[in-house]
Image: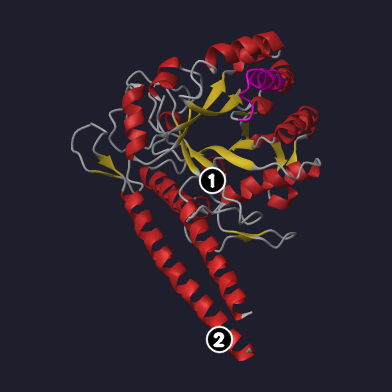
Amino acid sequence: MAALYSRIAMTYAVILFFTHLSTGVAALGINYGQVGNNLPPPERVLELLRSLKVTKSRIYDTNPEILTAFANSNVELIVTVENDMIGQLKDPQQALQWVSAHIKPYFPATRITGIQVGNEVLTDPDPTLMANLVPAMVGIHEALAQLGLDSHIQVSSPNSLAVLAQSFPPSAGTFKSEVSTVVYQYLQFLSTTESPFWINAYPYFAYKDDPSSISLDYVLFNPNPGMVDPYTKLRYDNMLYAQVDAITFAMARMGFGGIGVRVSETGWPSKGDPNEVGATLENAALYNKNLLRRQLKNEGTPLKPNMRLDVYVFALFNEDMKPGPTSERNYGLFQPDGTMAYNVGLSALSTSSSTSSASISLTSSATKGARKEYQSLVYWMFVFLLTCQVLMRRQF
């Protein structure tokens, strides 16, 4: 019996060990926008992503130059169907032609893992576009299945937080009644295909609109008292996690409690117009640095603490041709020449604009942290085994 207990203890320890080693910083991606006239070519962008140890990226089209350049790399790509294409792709034949032309020639050499159908369609003022969303998603999914790609590529559509009628407290999360019919169809599709609900979540906007009522530390992930949901008693120390859980509760209210939530966009502008409160270099650095630290821990939200939250940061570059206020052109972690827009824990070892020798100090910090966690794990494994031996001696 003592030998059996010893084997059980050792097996448990080995499982813990390999489980720990297998978890990495796999929850972080970066949005790669292209609305600029001075951006580097895709080959150099790939070098930059590699130097940062980032293995997930999202683009806003199916640019063949990017899909070709990213072939045979370890970077997973999510591609996008532009909003103006959705009306055509509700036709199954058109959807099959689109997938055959824009996806099949590049897969699997290019690691396409998802297709985002449109962007923030459920809050678009065009009712026809909204009505065509789910049929287009169905058509694309069926085309993928016909070509044998559906088990490799998920189909979804990112949404604005404005799709919610209420988001605070998180447990009160509710979808707007005027879009409930389309939202129900959308959730049915996600549930059937086991695809996630993607949300563009920007705590910056909430702070900008009401800086006198919303704590800056709360939206920047800085230490703060946080808030407690009065119904669930869950404590939230940052707004992003509260926004994500509000989506989960809203889906559960419609009978879809098993759909995962992922963040397709979040970020903070480093510059803005005079009326864009909070759009500063310091705040942008703090938001993204604190977010990256959380991602290194593979954190979940208070509602789902053991399920890591996948997040795609917006954006890789400042894009000088984006319309709108100044902030829209200043979300990038990097300038188009490859230099950092601000320091979020990244250290460029080269003084030139070449990205090949860039390094990420956050990665080295993560390595040190992982080493400490490994040492701690070994220590507790030893304590566990020692305790088992003491108990067995007492018993026998």
Within the image, what quadrant is residue 49 found in?
Answer: top left
71 versus 270 height, above or below: above
Magenta stretch secondary structure, dominant = helix
Within the image, what quadrant is residue 147 found in?
Answer: top right
The kind of residue tagged 1 is Tyr
Q: Which residue is mark 2?
A: 390
Colour scheme of the rendered structure: secondary structure
Residue 17: image location, x then y, percent: 49, 62
Residue 62: say if magenta.
no
Q: Residue placed at 35% from the left, 28% from the top?
A: 45
**Residue sticking out furthest to the left:** 351
Q: Which residue is mark 1?
A: 207
Kindly report the distance in space between the C-alpha atoms of the residues bearing marks 2 and 1: 56 Å
Q: Is residue 139 left or right of residue 298?
A: right
Helix, strand or loop status at disc 2: helix
Tell me the quadrant of the picture where the N terminus can be found. Answer: bottom right
Highlighted range, magenta:
138-151
Residue 2: image location, x then y, percent: 60, 80
Q: Which sits earlier in the primary sequence, circle 2 or circle 1?
A: 1
